[in-house]
């Protein structure tokens, strides 16, 4: 780790971590108790019906028993296998079996309800007497530099039918203010790759997913109108672009979009034809990690990936030994991780720099504001209602003017600010928010 990362980022963010862990997130315990009371009866009814099909003593929580029921008793065709070659019963496998037997959607629903009841409705057990959930944030647990936490707070479902995030509610007289970087990782991809089309779009404030959809699908409309006029096309290129960030293959893209592998390959080819600089960046990163066994992001954060330097004889995959196949898979995995790291690592550093700047401002000018959460590219605060508009107006400047030009990131980032009485009820802040009337 270089001096900048050590002193300006990791050591500087420590006081912010301490402040977040000390503040905790206010939780509406009664809301979660009511949710449990509503869901448990449905869960028992679903379980009863599953057990009627599965027979006496059937346990829907047992993957082995579910496997025997689906592929043994009911004789359904195996849609997916595990790494050991056994029939899979995970969520993806069950989704592929929908329509094959009535028990499949019942199993999916049971697992969904069990997850909510057992994981999220049990959060009150972890809440302190003052009504706040205090969790640990590990700033270096992930190789990318992203924050990680053993708590479920970073895994709460978004916009689901159960509205779990509504339980994370500001205390009386306060509001939750959230600010997240707009298309942060795509912004970094555009700047690191130096893609002219993307950079021009960023400078003009154009939606990058919309731009990609227009170019890949030859759409005759403004990129910023694609989400309204061609929602399916935007979704497709969004999968492509996020897939590139996470090193996804054509097979993964095909699965995400529900299309053939050949169609997915064609989409990727069309995308790279429109954004050739992105293809060159990926090729360069793969070449570097295979040669060096590590890769650095723009800030100098390094990811060691020694598996990339291993070698196998040049021959057809089917002719390789099991050991050689394993080595080749390891090389491919290392390439994908390197591809992801150069973007996600930079994003993590930018978010930490923004956290430091916001915290310094709070300590100096607004000690009554609490820094309560960091979630990837989003920061959240609990703010007195009277200060919401003032603080919300300050956040974009605090988070965007970070002096990144010296690292080659010359196009400013953008921030969206949201305000609400709870995490789940936050809405876009438009300059003047009815904070006082909404705060309890």
Image (cartoon, helix red, strand yellow):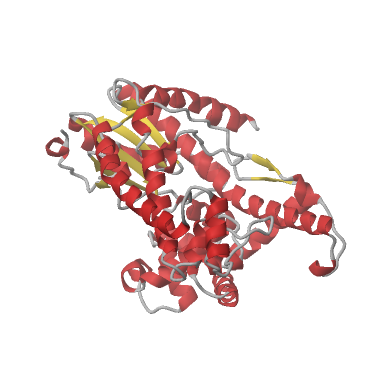
Q: Residue at x 39, y 62 (%)?
A: 206
The image position of residue 165, as x and y in percent, is 32, 42
Placement of the C terminus among the 4 image quadrants: top left
The image position of residue 412, as x and y in percent, is 44, 49
Pick whichever, 409 or 257, lies toward us: 257
Pick whichever, 86 or 80, lies toward us: 86
Residue 360: name its quadrant. Answer: top left
Q: Residue at x 21, y 45 (%)?
A: 431
The image position of residue 384, as x and y in percent, is 22, 29
Position of residue 314 relative to residue 30, above or below, is below
Residue 202: name its quadrant. Answer: bottom left
Residue 395: name its quadrant. Answer: top left
Q: Residue at x 43, y 51 (%)?
A: 111
The image position of residue 238, as x and y in percent, is 46, 63
The mark total stands at: 0
Placement of the N terminus among the 4 image quadrants: top right
The answer to whether any part of residue 206 appears in the image is: yes
Left or right: residue 200 versus residue 336 is left
């Amino acid at each position: 780790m270089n001096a900048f990362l050590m002193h300006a980022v990791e050591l500087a963010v420590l006081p912010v971590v301490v402040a977040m862990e000390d503040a905790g997130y206010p939780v509406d315990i009664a809301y979660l108790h009511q949710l449990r009371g509503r869901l448990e009866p449905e869960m028992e009814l679903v379980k009863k019906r599953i057990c009627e099909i599965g027979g006496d003593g059937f346990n829907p929580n047992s993957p082995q028993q579910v496997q025997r029921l689906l592929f043994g008793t009911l004789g359904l065709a195996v849609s997916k296998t595990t790494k050991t070659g056994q029939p899979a019963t995970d969520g993806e496998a069950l989704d592929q079996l929908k329509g094959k037997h009535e028990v499949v959607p019942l199993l999916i629903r049971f697992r969904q309800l069990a997850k909510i009841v057992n994981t999220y409705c049990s959060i009150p057990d972890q809440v302190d007497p003052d009504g706040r959930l205090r969790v640990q944030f590990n700033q270096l647990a992930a190789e990318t530099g992203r924050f990680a936490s053993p708590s479920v707070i970073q895994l709460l479902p978004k916009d689901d039918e159960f509205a779990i995030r509504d339980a994370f509610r500001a205390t009386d007289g306060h509001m939750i203010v959230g600010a997240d970087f707009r298309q942060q990782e795509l912004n970094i991809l555009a700047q690191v790759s130096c893609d002219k089309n993307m950079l021009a779009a960023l400078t003009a404030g154009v939606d990058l997913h919309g731009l990609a959809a227009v170019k890949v699908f030859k759409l005759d409309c403004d990129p910023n109108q694609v989400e309204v006029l061609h929602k399916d096309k935007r979704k497709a290129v969004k999968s492509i672009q996020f897939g590139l960030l996470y090193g996804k293959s054509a097979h993964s893209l095909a699965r995400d979009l529900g299309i053939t592998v050949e169609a997915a390959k064609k989409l990727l080819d069309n995308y790279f034809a429109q954004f050739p600089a992105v293809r060159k960046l990926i090729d360069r990163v793969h070449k570097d990690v295979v040669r060096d066994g590590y890769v650095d992001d723009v800030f100098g954060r390094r990811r060691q990936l020694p598996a990339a330097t291993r070698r196998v004889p040049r021959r057809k995959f089917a002719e390789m030994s099991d050991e050689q196949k394993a080595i080749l898979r390891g090389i491919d995995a290392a390439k994908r991780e390197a591809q992801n790291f150069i973007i996600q690592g930079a994003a993590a550093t930018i978010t930490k720099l923004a956290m430091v700047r916001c915290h310094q401002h709070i300590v100096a000018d607004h000690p009554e504001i609490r820094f309560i959460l960091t979630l990837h590219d989003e920061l959240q605060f609990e703010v007195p209602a009277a200060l919401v508009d003032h603080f919300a107006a300050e956040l974009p400047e605090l988070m965007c003017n970070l002096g990144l030009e010296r690292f080659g990131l010359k196009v400013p980032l953008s921030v969206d600010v949201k305000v609400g009485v709870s995490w789940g009820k936050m809405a876009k802040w438009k300059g003047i928010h009815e904070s006082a009337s909404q705060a309890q």
